[in-house]
Image (spheres, grey):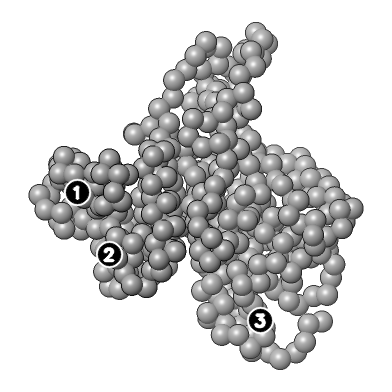
């Protein structure tokens, strides 16, 4: 890292009091884990591992590390799996006939990558999303199979797996889980582990996914109900974020530019005559998909008892992978806001839109967006309250009614 002069150290030391911290990234600190995003599979089925850190190792600035010659941080590299990958892992371990040979080979290659890179992996996001969406007996039964699958994988003899692709239990590893969960049998451990992960999302996760859901609903309605230009649609969505939900959602703004350009229609499948409840379910799922993309910065900002998680989103969804690839984390600043505790600083790559938007038009939209963000910061500053949940619920309810009306109304776009 570039050497700090005494004035820098003094300024940072004042800011970083009271357990504040800053994560920064520099090109001269490459990551020992991943050097960029990577794909497994083919056009039929692809698993994408997304590196939102740009192949760099995070550098922690806090009151203990500023000015220090060296600091060693116990990073725990983690693969955050989406629900599609969790499902195919279950089919892979159970040798389900529904999994084609090419898909099986993709899963095998991906699993070998996880083992060789010594990346932690678990189905925590699947459990969090599933519990929120459908806490039902069917979910609980499949959740137990998921827990059994991942216990098999995480207790396997990795040396033998790399040599022969066989999943063979290592009793020594299983014994550590037996001690942790107070159970002596494989099934007992798997059941206790599943129960431990089936917990409701905390208020922050619930709030962010609800705001995201509202933004995607509004995005879809703007696109289908108006004949405005892409720039004007984007401006209307930003006004909604600023004046209604009161949060500037970065991933949703990036998604909207592609959606308004004609991309991602299956990701947000709002159409005349469509089953409104199915559309709403898909958009709810999309809001969780976008929260998945936020997990690397969320987990990096939270120090756990087992170290700091350096997380990589893994998804089998092509749209999600494309959106995820196009932004990179540059910094995390804690103590900047009172409500979320930290803010991320992200850079975006909009070059994928050059096929659909003239460069001058895109540049004009992006410059307008930068000015909009500066205006929000100068207007509200770091101390701003989120929209009350009761008001957010009213906004969501009205948007859902608008979607139902659109699906059942045969009137053409105005």
Label drawn at residue 84: none
Locate the N terminus by quadrant: top right
Q: Hey, which residue is sitting farthest bottom in the picture?
A: 410
Whichever of callouts 2 and 1 sits on the residue coming sooner in the sequence is 2
Q: Hey, which residue is sitting farthest top in the picture?
A: 6
Label drawn at residue 271: 3
Q: Hey, which residue is sitting farthest front in the picture?
A: 164
The relative height of residue 414 versus residue 362 in the rendered view (above or below) is: below
Residue 42, quarter of picture: bottom right
Q: Secondary structure at mark 3?
A: loop
Instruction: Please state which of residues 142 and 135 is positioned toward the viewer in this rendering.
Output: 142
Q: Are marks 2 and 3 in contact (CB under 8 Å)?
A: no
The relative height of residue 203 versus residue 273 in the rendered view (above or below) is: above
Mark 3 to mark 1 CA distance (whole Å) = 49 Å
Residue 230 at what x, y percent from top left?
Answer: 81, 64
The relative height of residue 189 versus residue 92 in the rendered view (above or below) is: above
Which residue is identified by label 2?
Answer: 94
Whichever of callouts 3 and 1 sits on the residue coming sooner in the sequence is 1
Closer to us: mark 2 or mark 3?
Answer: 2
Q: What residue is rendered at 32% in x and 44% in y? A: 162
Q: Hey, which residue is sitting farthest left in the picture?
A: 184
Residue 178 at what x, y percent from top left?
Answer: 15, 45
Q: What residue is rendered at 73% in x and 76% in y? A: 224
Whichever of callouts 2 and 3 sits on the residue coming sooner in the sequence is 2
Which residue is identified by label 1?
Answer: 169
Query: Is 355 on the left or on the right of 318, as rendered?
Result: right
């Amino acid at each position: 890292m570039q050497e700090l002069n005494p004035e820098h150290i003094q300024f940072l030391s004042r800011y970083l009091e009271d357990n504040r911290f800053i994560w920064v990234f520099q090109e001269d600190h490459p990551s020992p884990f991943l050097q960029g995003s990577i794909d497994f599979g083919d056009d039929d089925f692809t698993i994408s591992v997304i590196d939102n850190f740009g192949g760099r190792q995070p550098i922690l600035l806090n009151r203990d590390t500023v000015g220090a010659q060296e600091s060693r941080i116990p990073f725990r590299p983690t693969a955050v799996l989406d629900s599609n990958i969790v499902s195919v892992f279950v089919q892979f371990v159970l040798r389900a006939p529904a999994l084609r040979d090419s898909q099986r080979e993709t899963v095998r290659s991906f699993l070998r990558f996880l083992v060789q890179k010594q990346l932690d992996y678990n189905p925590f996001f699947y459990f969090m999303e599933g519990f929120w969406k459908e806490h039902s007996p069917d979910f609980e039964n499949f959740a137990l199979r998921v827990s059994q699958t991942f216990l098999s994988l995480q207790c396997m003899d990795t040396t033998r797996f790399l040599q022969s692709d066989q999943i063979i239990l290592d009793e020594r590893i299983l014994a550590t889980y037996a001690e942790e969960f107070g159970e002596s049998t494989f099934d007992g451990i798997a059941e206790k582990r599943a129960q431990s992960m089936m917990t409701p999302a905390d208020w922050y996760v619930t709030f962010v996914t609800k705001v995201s859901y509202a933004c995607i609903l509004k995005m879809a309605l703007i696109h289908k109900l108006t004949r405005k230009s892409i720039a004007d649609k984007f401006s209307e969505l930003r006004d909604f974020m600023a004046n209604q939900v009161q949060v500037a959602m970065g991933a949703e703004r990036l998604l909207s530019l592609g959606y308004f350009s004609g991309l991602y229609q299956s990701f947000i499948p709002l159409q005349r005559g469509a089953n409104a409840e199915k559309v709403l379910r898909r958009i709810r799922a999309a809001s969780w998909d976008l929260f998945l993309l936020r997990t690397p910065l969320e987990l990096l900002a939270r120090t756990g008892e087992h170290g700091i998680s350096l997380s990589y989103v893994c998804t089998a969804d092509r749209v999600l992978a494309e959106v995820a690839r196009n932004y990179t984390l540059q910094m995390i600043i804690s103590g900047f806001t009172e409500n979320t505790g930290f803010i991320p600083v992200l850079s975006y790559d909009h070059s994928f839109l050059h096929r659909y938007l003239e460069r001058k038009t895109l540049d004009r939209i992006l410059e307008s967006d930068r000015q909009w963000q500066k205006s929000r910061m100068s207007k509200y500053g770091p101390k701003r309250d989120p929209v009350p949940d009761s008001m957010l619920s009213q906004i969501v309810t009205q948007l859902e009614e608008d979607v139902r009306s659109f699906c059942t109304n045969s009137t053409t776009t105005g």
